[in-house]
Amino acid sequence: MGEYKFISKENVEGKTIVVRADLNSNVENGELFAGARIKEHAKTMKFLSEKGAKVVVLAHQGRKGDEDFSPLDQHAAAISEEIEKPVKLVKWSEDYVAAIQAMQNGDIILMDNVREFDDEEKEFTPEEASKLERVQKIGSVSNMFVQDALSVCHRSQPSVVGFTALLPSYVGPVLEKEVNALKHYDKGEKPCVFILGGAKIEDSLKLIKVILDNGKADTVCVGGLFGELFLKAAGKKLGEKDKFFEEKNLMSLVEPAKQLLDAHGEKIVLPVDVAAVDDDDERKELTVDELPTDYLVCDIGTETAALFKQKLKKAKFAVFNGPLGMFERYGFEVGTKRVFDALKSGKAFALLGGGDTETAIEQLEFSFEDFSHVSLAGKALLTYLSGKELPGLKVLQK
């Protein structure tokens, strides 16, 4: 990881600053549920505003054609409420250059969803992106660019890389915390323990291969759907849950998981027990030797949680990505909660990431402050941990 310029160290009074934030949140039936991303990026806006900057925010919500694709008026209202300061939404159809030029020190405007532009989803070099009309226009009336979201840095999209070719570019406060946390990973602090769960098992499979092949991780504990995949790879039949693997076309992932077990079996810690939903809708624990079961497996068992906690005791650096069961279902939050407790009280630098992980932290009544660092990035974090370069970070390096 290179060296960066941090906006927190600069004098920004009177400067017009373009901030790329990630406000992408849950939108259901047209209603926004403001989560951690909005709360965290709102702090950046408030910080810059209080230092006398004119703050122009760029962000997206969903993708064209998806149910959660929406304008950002509710986002502007949510930020405004969070920081107790007006945030003006400016539409792309308006004269947005005039709107920016009319700003006073401390003003904040949020430009509407950048993904209204079809080319926002395409990949560009910084020079190519800097020639797009909206980038040119906003760049011409701005002084600085601030990237504040690790979660968009794995894409070389116009709002991510375009302004870096036109303006002095900086790392924002949210991204600064991410970058500092990732330095621990880059330093190769050992022993390094990964705990991988969640439902994005294809991404996790790519990650586990890289971190074991290159010796980044000493131990990888697998839970949730990901752990169940490895149980299948070890020759276990799950029973009812096998149907889910077939329905979701996940059977093709069993063979690559088996190859990983053959190559790195001693470093991969599989569940020794699971919890399933019995006929009374209650939690029923079964050892893996009692599988297959007609009941639906929904969590790791308490013995597995204890085993994972044991592995964490020796760790200097720990990564948690993806819950270890259906934590939102009463009685099946046990595995995730117990491992959170171990990460909270342990000595390891604990880096937690993934959208579902954020939700689990909130629902299980933990706070971000309980852990060394909670990343707001999902795919971008996995990409970084896999050792790949993130174009959005590369363009910010001095």
Image (cartoon, grey):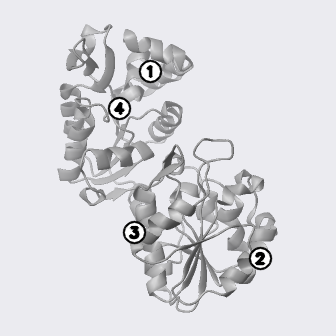
Q: Secondary structure at mark 3?
A: helix
Look at mark 4 in the image and give the residue it sits on: 267
Q: Secondary structure at mark 1?
A: helix
Mark 2 residue type: Lys
Mark 4 residue type: Lys
Q: Residue at x 74, y 72 (%)?
A: 94
Q: Residue at x 45, y 59 (%)?
A: 37
- Label 3 crowd (10 A; few <14 / some 14-19 / many >=20): some
Rendered location of residue 12, percent (x, y): 53, 88
Please report whichever mark, 2 or 3, sits nearer to the chain's N-terminal start: 3
Please report whichever mark, 4 or 3, sits nearer to the chain's N-terminal start: 3
Rendered location of residue 324, percent (x, y): 33, 33
Image quadrant containing the C terminus: bottom right
Spatial CA span between label 3 and label 1:
51 Å
Look at mark 1 in the image and give the residue it sits on: 262
Q: Nearer the viewer, residue 70 or 285?
A: 70
Q: Nearer the viewer, mark 2 or mark 1?
A: 2
Residue 82 is marked as 3
Q: Are marks 3 and 1 in contact (CB under 8 Å)?
A: no
368 in relation to 27, above or below: below
Horizontally, is 160 left or right of 302 in the view?
A: right
